[in-house]
Image: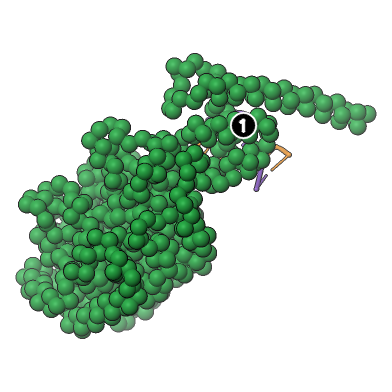
Chain colours: A green, B purple, C orange
Amino acid sequence: MVFKKRLEYSFNGYQVPAMPQIPKSAKGKRSVRRKVVDGQMCAFDLLAAVAGKILERENSSTLSSIVGNSNLNVKQEQLDEEKPCKDEPFDQVSSKESTSGSELPIQRQIAHTLKEHLQIPKATASGSTFVAVKSDVLNKDIYTGDFVANGSKEELGYSPGTTAKKCCTDGYSPCSAESCEAEFMEGIKTPFISDQHEAATSVVKNIQHSWCLDNPVEQDAKPPALASLDSSIKVPLNGHLIPHISSFLICRDDTELLVDRDDDENSSGCIHHSTITPKALKPQYHKIRKLFSKTDVETKPDFHSLKFCYTRRRTQRYSFKRRRVFEHRLTSPSDGGISSKGSCSSSENEINYKTNNSHAALHGENGTSSSACGQLSSYKSENFDVKLSIKSFNVPEFFIEISETATVGSLKRTVMEAVTAFLGGGLHVGVLLQGKKVRDDNKTLLQAGISHVDKLDNLGFMLEPKSTGASSPVTTPEYPHTLRPCDATEPLARHPAASPAPVPEIFNASLEPLVTSAVNFLERDHDSVHSPIDTKLVNKAAAATSNSRALVPVPAMSVDALSMVPLHKPRRSELAQRRIRRPFSVSEVEALVEAVEKLGTGRWRDVKLRAFDNAKHRTYVDLKDKWKTLVHTARISPRQRRGEPVPQELLDRVLAAHAYWSQQQARLQVQTPLAEACVLV
DNA sequence: ATTAGGG
DNA sequence: CCCTAAT
């Protein structure tokens, strides 16, 4: 019997590379990329837009398929309605979508094909912006990055000839999840293959052409932002055909969205992230290639053949930051990867966002009202945009298994394949606000609280596996406990044959030294963990790894040495998502009181239907709870009350109604048992 | 799906 | 606001 030892790697959350940086526009400053989203855009649309094309590498399919069954049509009908009047309940207000000026209805934009989408100017297309963001990051531009062992990327070596085994013996055993991470490099793959260039150019032409055809009116009546679009239409394509789509889209925003930030590690980023015009494309490529050959010492033929290329950041610092993010996730899984909890990751946050009126929020404490009324008024006063910056996506954890004699290069490739399959296999985008998932896709950003902020980084996006491939990518609320193996393994299964992967070395059953060293390593590793929670989790992971690292009988010369087994350990962040808190406004309280006065305290469904039928985020449970708290509030002294003060008059009515209906209930309680007793007798 | 109540 | 038992 032939045994082969296998190594398993757990990748606990990839860092999808940050958006390309926009070029520096101020000395010593780095502009932070931001996205502009219509403040009224439904969260659904946001999801659709972001999630939109994660699964679809081809830029040709339509977004309408994603929007599909949504409230698209309804909203389109509502588009022309006049703006809500003053005292309309919050939800009625928000449910009406309105566009201002020459803006295109977002829904219509989403119905566009993606190609067209990419043309839509910023001023009109928040959805397209996000699509571009997604596409830019999640297409094949991403490549498998380097492996970090013990926090050190440098030591592991880049040569595909360096085997994992060697890494082990060198003290950089990739055996434990903690000690070995894979990460996407902080960059976007830069194409340097000429046919890509050709394709790119032609597609650009097509795009430009189609855009002109399809949007003649908009082009004429374009808002200011559109003007800059025309003058600098910058290869608005993504994928391996043309990179930098997001640069294109982003750059139009940057002037107004600059954020002071020291820029010291952006040397390569400048090249990658600079926008390029079709004409300038070719020279740029040469430049880049040159730079590659110089910097990227270890770029090997098999990577070329796979059309992977990667830059290499020498700055250990960046890697460290990444690691911190990783650890942060381990430490507080419940935050869903949102880095708002201190640590340096908050400066490297995944999402920054900012409202037009958030300057006050930034500089003063309570610059923006967080009450529904405040939202309402600001909503009415102006259609402000929400500016978002997607720094990175967090790809859910998955698992691969690989022979320890595989080379690092093949490991990278394996991970690449796995990730590609993973991403392609079906993900949807979750929106997190302050670490909580925003599940209600029908909420507007305003309603969801995404439009007003007191923190910069309490909004996040996360990629999640879809539970079913058939379901809409934007409506899957549940996190599957396992990933369907076919999602990830299938591409892998057929890949090894075509790859220059190393011939797997066959081990016999005596592997003591290696196992021992692995154990040692694990212990060493867990000693080095920083926080207690970390330690726990790592131990867990280590145990799991140890168990599954048992000798695995494999057929000699098996080709599936690179098989990948996606696993999933459900964590709380995936299971639970507390809804965002939405304090009841006075008008809501009034409506509630009125309804309860009439219907009583035991018919919350009717109360809901009567007074909150159009408030989708208020469930009858919410109303019941609110009534409970109202009764409590009415009973305590005014100085003990918190939040927006409820008029005493209302509280009096609450007490009165509560007393009345309690009495009624009591009477029923008395009557029923008697009746039953009579029946029994 | 609703209701009631504890957390 | 969440969770759950009981309807």
The residue under the point 14% across, 52% down is: A30
Quarter of the figure with residue A104: bottom left
Q: Where in the figure is residue A492, as x and y percent of width and height?
A: 36, 74
Residue A349 visible, this orientation: yes
The residue under the point 21% across, 69% down is: A230
Query: In the figure, is residue A152 to the left or right of A74?
Result: left
Instruction: Please name the amino acid that badge 1 sits on.
Output: Glu
Which chain letter goes with mark 1?
A: A
Which quarter shows the C terminus of chain A? Answer: top right
Depth order, front residue of A12/A388? A388
Q: Residues within 10 Å of mark 1 (few under 14, many from 20)?
A: some
Depth order, front residue of A604/A346? A604
Which quarter shows the N terminus of chain A? Answer: bottom left
The residue under the point 47% across, 44% down is: A85
Query: In the figure, is residue A549 to the left or right of A352?
Result: right
Depth order, front residue of A478/A552? A478
Q: Where in the figure is residue A499, as x and y percent of width and height?
A: 27, 79
Please, which residue is most extreme toward the right here?
A681
Q: Does dot 1 land on a helix, a strand or a loop?
A: helix
Q: Where in the figure is residue A119, as x and y percent of width and height?
A: 30, 70
Decide: is A172 above or below A675: below
Depth order, front residue of A334/A482? A334
Residue A566 visible, this orientation: no
Residue located beneath label 1 in the image: A594
Decide: is A144 above or below A671: below
Q: Where in the figure is residue A175, as x and y percent of width and height?
A: 28, 58
Decide: is A112 above or below A336: below
Quarter of the figure with residue A597: top right
The residue under the point 22% across, 49% down is: A348
Decide: is C3 above or below A291: above
